[in-house]
Amino acid sequence: MTRAGAVINPGQPRDQRMNLFSDIRGLVIASLEAMAADGLLPAGLDLANVAVEPPRDAGHGDMATNAAMVLAKPAGAKPRDIAEALVGRLAADPRIAEAEVAGPGFINLRLVPGVWQGLIAQVIRDGAGYGRSDMGQGAKVNVEFVSANPTGPMHVGHVRGAVFGDALAALLDFAGHAVTREYYINDGGAQVDVLARSAYERYREANGLDPEIREGLYPGDYLIPVGEALKQKYGASLLDKPEAEWLAELREFATEAMMEMIRGDLAALGVHMDVYSSEKSLYGTGKIEAAIEQLRGMGLIYEGVLEPPKGKVPDDWEPREQTLFRSTSHGDDVDRPVKKSDGAWTYFAPDIAYHYDKVSRGFDQLIDVLGADHGGYVKRLKAVVAALSDNRVPLDVKLIQLVKLFKNGEPFKMSKRAGTFVTLRDVVEQAGADVTRFMMLTRKNDAALDFDFAKVLEQSKDNPVFYVQYAHARVCSVIRKAAEAGIHCDDATLAVADLSRLDHPAEMELARRIAEWPRLVEIAARGHEPHRVAFYLYDLASDLHTHWNRGNEDTSLRFVQEGEVETSQAKIALARAVAVVISAGLGILGVTPAEEMR
RNA sequence: GGCCCCGUAGCUCAGGGGAUAGAGCGACCGCCUCCUAAGCGGUAGGUCAUAGGUUCGAAUCCUAUCGGGGCCGCCA
């Protein structure tokens, strides 16, 4: 038996993605099919639920499969019997060092060291591409996020949605989707009229008059430069004109100025949209009418009167006939008005047109990232997309819970009047884009998140961003040190290092975590859950730190081995593989992998 | 009243059909003549809100209840 000494699978075809878990699952499936061919299992069993996963307890081995338990019932056999037969087949594979039945019918697998060594070489060869998946098969996915009203700078409340959407988009891209990042500009409603009037007052101010920032107008200083710009453009010519003469022009001007600012805010966070869609452009162009007509053609638009809401009925409730969308036919609780009683469109109408537009552009999947306060809107949006795509395009709405701000453990509320209004710029300038982005992803999207400025700036293991970056920096430090000692450790050299020297259980443990990366990517992408990447990176960093400290007691585990170039290179290759994965993961989150900590 | 989300260690949260439920913080005890101790190890701490149900197996799925938050009118 020489298999323990051989590095298995040092090179894979370029177009084949490295994923040890799916490789071994493939082996399990092939073995089961062979058993079926031999009459040991019934033919045509559904193998979809057969999983190969990392065991909860590392003591159980490298991987575990539930095959025997899943198939026992449909096969009409005892789990134990299936497992015993399967174990025999699996053990015959050169990658398997040990296969045994355990617990209620699990099969625990231990892989030969050569598999892990081959993995490390492959990770270094793949570099930033390691973990990429073909799962999405190039499906066109539209991720709509941020979509803040163009009436002012972005504030902290928007940051989480921006980071989440951007990371989700990157994750889906990494998992093989063709992703479009899109921003829906709410420039069609009454709020942009308010913006225009507010800008007008600043325009008057620029002309030396006292601005009248009445209740209900936007008082922010950020409109002062807009007023100046308006003076540049119009001089004093609008000063005595009635609103009707300047409103439309100023709306356009101010909205464009706000969008310019918002694009800058997003850029400061490292977010870049592919498409900006305008709500206003849906009005007066027949697009809303076309979308409504489409629905009408399906019998989903009608004139009717809604029941008053149950429970607390509003004082001024009167039953009125309106134009309604029959969203109940696609899972909503009540039908929704698309026209007000005065004949104007409701806010919902352009949204119908917008989603129709997205469907028409040929996307295979739509994702809307919305604030949690839009929860009541989800069903009608899904109904729209289901109806307008004939159930072909799934819409997933990700609701982002609020961010609670803290300063030194003390919560504080944002208030424009109290001067505690925190903009995105404030956060990025104080905390930095990297820290902000990572922190925003350390919680599931549907859980509220505490953001404490003091903690976020802390450079210690209590700060997960720092902790992960430190792990990456440590590896970089090792490579620098090794290079100074004359050890070649560029990737090309490491990829062909004699990795059979990597055989310590502790080293195999690190490799095992690295092997989980492609699997993690697929799970996170499938669930639209970028936070899983952040948690995985934390675990990987923790493993690296643990291994590092093992070198304190057992010097043979240090990455750089004095006077032993080849052994050092093998160990550095392992460290490098960790750095490659951290770098790739941080790349998805939009965080820079630090090369050194200062 | 209806709908959505949440309830897991003292605190903040992962885990979302599988084996003895995890991490960080806080507490306590340890580890630097050594690649960054900005780090690591260990101890203590849980009726996974409650009650039923489905399943070979439930923190995980279903139902009900309790508790917390959000949403529910021609506002966007």
Image: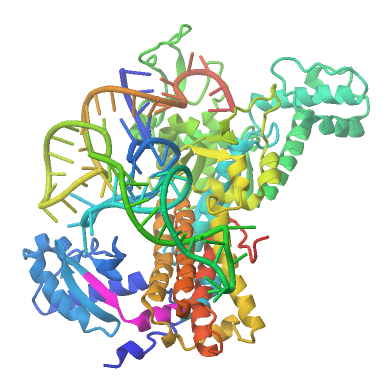
Report the front residue among A334 and A78: A78
Residue found farthest to the bottom = A2
Task: Give the magenta part as a residue range.
Answer: A108-120
Q: Is residue A2 above or below residue A57?
A: below
The percent position of residue B71, horizontal first and vertical second, equals 46, 25
Q: Is residue A192 visible?
A: yes
The percent position of residue A571, horizontal first and vertical second, equals 49, 80
Q: Is residue A501 above or below residue A55?
A: below
A113 sits to left or right of A132 = left
Whether residue A323 appears in magenta in the rendering, the answer is no
Count of marks, rendered view: 0
Quadrant in which the N terminus of chain A is drawn: bottom left
Residue at 51 percent of width and 52 percent of height: A168
The percent position of residue A554, horizontal first and vertical second, equals 44, 76
Q: Quadrant of residue A376?
A: top left
Report the front residue among A361 and A251: A251
Q: Is residue A139 visible?
A: no
Residue found farthest to the top = A315
Quadrant in which the C terminus of chain A is drawn: bottom right
Q: Quadrant of residue A74?
A: bottom left
**Main secondary-structure element of the magenta-colored stretch:** helix
Residue at 57 percent of width and 86 percent of height: A493
The percent position of residue A417, horizontal first and vertical second, equals 70, 21
Residue at 63 percent of width and 49 percent of height: A275
A593 sits to left or right of B70 = right
